[in-house]
Amino acid sequence: MSLTPSLLPFQSVQFTTTEPGKRLIVTGAVHGNEVAGTHGIRRVIDEIESGALALACGSVTFVPITNPKAYALKRRNGDRNLNRNLQPTAPGVAPAEFEDHIANWLCPLMAKHDALLDLHSFQAQGQAFVMVGPQNNTGALEPTVHGDTERDWALRLGVKRAVDGWLGTYAKGVDERRARAERQPASEGKRHDLDAKYGVGTTEYMRSTGGMALTLECGQHDDPNGPEVAYRAIRNTLALFGLTDEPVPATETAMEGLHLGTVVDKFDRNDAFARPWQSFDPLRAGDVIGTRANGEVVRAPHDGYIVFPNALAEANYEWFYVAEATGRFNP
């Protein structure tokens, strides 16, 4: 089967009540090999359709498979990473990649909602965690008035670790990539990783429309508990926003808070880790993390934790992140 847009329709399932309330959207399989959210979403859809779960007000829209091409291929991306540089194509510009077609459908859909819960998983072993946007600010990069609300929402999803600092870290990473690219021979084709908006994915786009958003990483891709993590987070979110009459979930009182501050790219596909790192393994300043293909040793820049170590990363893409503890999520 040819994986063309006409053969891969997009699907959303919406439930709307007669009473006013929050408009929530829940997305799964933004990356095609991250299916815990897909399973969790379908479980909640089945409960609503069967009458086992009743909505009290507002509306909820579910997108079980956000990237059908990547999902069909059972891999992270279709033509490119959908969760980077997410925006509709400009008027009069024809979509060049399958993810452009998705963006042209998905971005207007998200903009009709007040809140987004985006469900993911990750490659290395580790426990589930939630990615939160910045604190309230009026800056140019990611202004928001929902910082406190997102924090409180994150504390009620049912996980014990929260991470912020994503887009600010990306901005620094893009600056570093551009500096390297200027020193290297020109390459053919478009470099998405050099785009000023690289790092803007589903949650960042949602915030740009005035909404609030969280990314829930439900655990390692094949963790059998991942679908349950996704399911529980959806149910907790519905209750928190009053979309169901269920009790508001309790606040997590032992949340570990971390702030991303550093992203390190692979320069060559043969750059290699010193050992099989897992997300949130602790680091001490100077610890050997890996070795470049040219023999350069890569060390931890400061005490902290390694996040999203990706041994399979391609050149000029994220290899790992470094995070530090933050008190933002102390109840």
Image (cartoon, grey):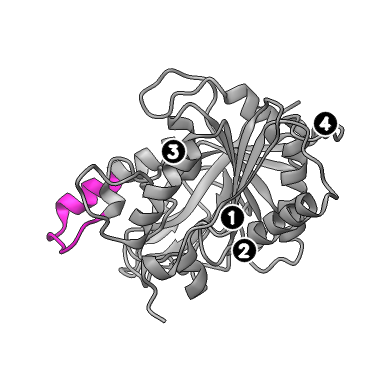
Residue under label 1, please give it.
Answer: 28
Q: Amino acid at mark 4?
A: Val
Mark 1 is on which residue type?
Gly
On screen, residue 263 above or below 227: above
Q: Residue 82 colored magenta?
A: no
Lower position in the chain sequence, tag 4 or tag 1: 1
- Whole-Å distance between the Cαs marked 2 and 1? 7 Å
User: Which residue has dot 2 on it?
Assistant: 35
> Picture coordinates of residue 111 (x, y %)?
47, 35
Q: Are marks 4 and 1 in contact (CB under 8 Å)?
A: no
Please state which amino acid type lies under the numbered disc 2: Val
Residue interval drawn in magenta: 176-191
Q: Quadrant of the N terminus?
A: bottom left
Q: Nearer the viewer, residue 56 or 44?
A: 56
Element type at mark 3: helix
Residue 258 located left or right of residue 309: right
Query: Which residue corresponds to the image point at 33% horizontal and 54% vertical from the top-left?
Result: 100
Query: Residue at (80%, 31%) from the top-left corner?
Result: 251
Q: Is residue 189 magenta?
A: yes
Residue for badge 3: 205
Is any atom of residue 250 visible in this view?
yes
Alpha-carbon span between mark 1 and mark 3: 16 Å
- In the image, which disc is placed on residue 328? none
Q: Amino acid at mark 3?
A: Tyr
Residue bearing mark 4: 248
Residue sitting at the far bottom? 1
Secondary structure at badge 4 equals: loop
